[in-house]
Amino acid sequence: MSQIPFLVETSRVLEILSRQIYDSPFAMARENVQNAFDAVLMRGNLEGKPASSYRIEVTAAADRISIRDEGIGMSERVLRENFWRAGSSGKNNDAARAAGVIGTFGIGAMANFGVCERLQVDTRELGQPAGTRTVALKSELSIGKDCVSIEPLGADTEVGTTLTASMGTAAPVDVAGLRNYLAPFVRFLAVPVLFNGELLSQQDPRLGAGIGAEWRTLGSRTLAAGRFRFEATVFAEGNQVAVVVDQLSIDGVASAGGLWLRHGGGQVMGLRSRFGLAPIPLPSHYQLGGYADLPFLFPTAGREALTRESIQEASQLIGPIEHALTEVLKDTELADSLAAFQQHVNQTGQIAWGSRVTVQMNPGDHRVEMGKLRETHPGVDLHWYAGTDADTISVFSSEDAPLIRVSQNNPRRDLQQRYLREVLGLAPVPDTATIIEAYAVSDLSWDEVSLTLSIARVLKIDYLIDDVVVEWVRISHGVPMLTETAGERLTLRISRTWSAIQALLRVVASSPEVSEGITKDFVRVHVYEKIKAFVPSSQRAGLDALQKTLAKRRELYRLDVDDKGDLEPLLAEYLAGHVGFTEVLTAAAKASSGQTQRVSSDTVGAVEQVLNDVVNTAVEPPPVQAISVPVAGSPILRPDTAPRERLLTTARELPQLNNHRMFLALSDRLFQLEREFFTFPHSTQVAWAGRRIVFLFGMAQSAQNLYYDIELRGARTAGAAGGTPLITTTIVTKNRIFVPVPSQLMECFKVADDPVEFYVRFDLLGHQ
């Protein structure tokens, strides 16, 4: 049997061993810097000195790269058997492993010839009297032949190694690019690494991960996971969190490694002995990024990734680290703001840890930590709502029984629902509230009946709701009030146990003389928001709605009831069931008719006398322009003028007063209660029909509107229905508020021998 030789093509082997692994001067330099660092570690381990006691210097130019280290150096034997022999490594021994070396592949010098043409290595081993120089040319390399020159160096050669790689002229070295490439790999090394004289190393990995000295410590945990035991300390700055792992031991043996991880920090870069290796793909709820220095991390042959076994082992640390991070955060305010915390709590099922996550409470927009809901609302049967329907929120939320609003965004939403249900045992609200009990009139006290009529009267007179029914009930889920409409009828069902109602009843019982004003306030504060959709207003239906409502109620306003005492017998009849609610309410509305305003000849004056400075101003006023829609304007303020008159007239059309020739003083009570309203810019509208004249004033940039309702008496009438917006020309003096009277209505207020009398009513709409 004959045999054939096993032949190797040298150039092809070099390409496989070098170019496809270290295919650029950058990768070649990184490999040699790593070898230099390994040599420093081994020397430091033998001499018992820290790595910072030695140096690594990289000198780069367009045609060459030189790497000098003060490491352990190489003997001639090591050069022959390891460095210049591919596949053999001198670092696979206990001493090297104890030092924490990184390289173990043994490709050695072969890696350089993917990019260099000539390689020179000057070295002297620690403890040897002299050094050795070896040189190889890529063009002369041949497997199995003596193609590497070797010669001795003198005793003056320093311990360590200097490797010089000369490049071909066709591919010059990008010096700046090489510097930027090497920096991330060496930035955290304790040994000084200088690149053309610039220090690239000795940086703090904690700062590198973005965890500054100003970050505050939140807490720490000692953890054990499989082979590992370590201390995890949590830090925070603003809404950012981080965790630092130190005191790491593996199988009971202390390790110098550690982790520096920050929330949202990007990828995790793997290190070994602080030398950069490759990113570690670690799944993380907190999107932890930073650095992990672990002794079991091994790169693949190309150094561009870590081995699968390394990644799997590192992954065992993330679960305990995130558990510790979440356990520390649960007692801080960050639990409420960090979605990553909430997601991790949901994932691990530690729902009770969500106690510091807040929920929104209605009414209002205040927030309460879920763990304090029982404490802040003792004895209250709380419920929660996960939807957004405004009507449901309005029905089930009150000061007595606030409604818990669940977020619409996950993971916050899931955590809130699970905590409310599983930890607090709270139930969601149903689709509708239930009337548990309805009370007959005979079940009510005298004060409750009086308050019923008072509330209905305010709704009819002040809010222009003609057909209203007020019922007393007990409602499920602590709901204080329900509203229902059928046609034009508004039914208001009020909980008898509502604390606001109970407080109002105490006022009615103790101070009946102020009950009317207090009831108005109650309706404005507690009822209006529930029924505002039924109230005619400038925002919803404008003056047309007001005019229609006034026309329907004309007879009611014409009634002249002078004695409020007539209401008492009717109340008694109502309680006995002899009189219907509508009849009682009608009489109650009569009994509470508005103020009577009286304008006589001795209270009429000339505009020129009161506003002499305005009328006779030397400044040419702008021309008066008609307007078709309400436009807000500023009032004329004369706080030092106190006119006796209640009606100001002029025979001239004065541009300074927008050509208005008559100004009517509003009631003294309105002046006392709402003067401030008229000192701000506002719009003015007027509508009239028959005996009714309604002024509607709208506050600029606000939802507030004030209506002023005039009911003429005697034979005076405003005539056919009409209306117009006015250029606001309100005059506010020390003791009066004057508003312009449209020319169409001047006859209604002209004073002759007899006084002019009319009823007025006013109130704010849309008051917040």
Image (cartoon, grey):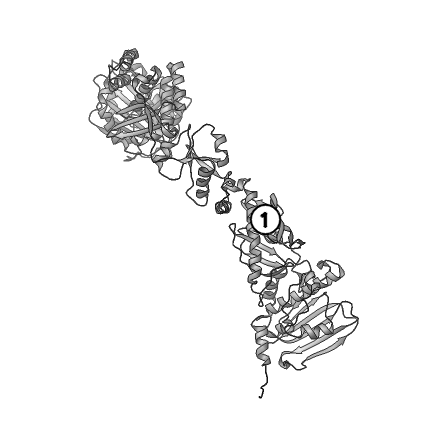
Which residue is at the front of the view, 566 or 584? Answer: 584
Q: Position of residue 409 (x, y in %)?
A: 43, 44
Identify the secondary structure beneath mark 1: strand
- Residue at the (46%, 27%) spot, across then down: 379
Where, by quadrant of the figure, is residue 641 drawn? top left
Q: Could you say which is closer to the camera, residue 316 or residue 101?
A: 316
Please tell me whether residue 100 is drawn above or below residue 345 in the rendered image.
below
Viewer-closest of 453 and 460: 453
What residue is shown with label 1?
243
Q: Position of residue 386 (x, y in %)?
A: 39, 39
In the rendered image, which quarter is residue 12 located in?
A: bottom right
Viewer-side residue, 182 vs 373? 373
Which quarter of the rendering shows the N terminus?
bottom right
Exactly how many numbered labels are in the figure? 1
Give coordinates of residue 624: x percent, y percent. 30, 33
Category of crowding for the residue at label 1, using alpha-carbon neighbours closer than 10 angstroms: few (below 14), some (14–19), many (at least 20):
many
Indicate left or right for 466 with 314 as reference: left
Answer yes or no: is residue 614 visible.
Answer: no
Q: Residue furthest front?
A: 1
Compared to 457, does 124 lie above or below? below
Residue type highlighted by circle 1? Val
Residue 17 visible to the viewer: yes
Placement of 448 over or under 636, stated as above or below? above
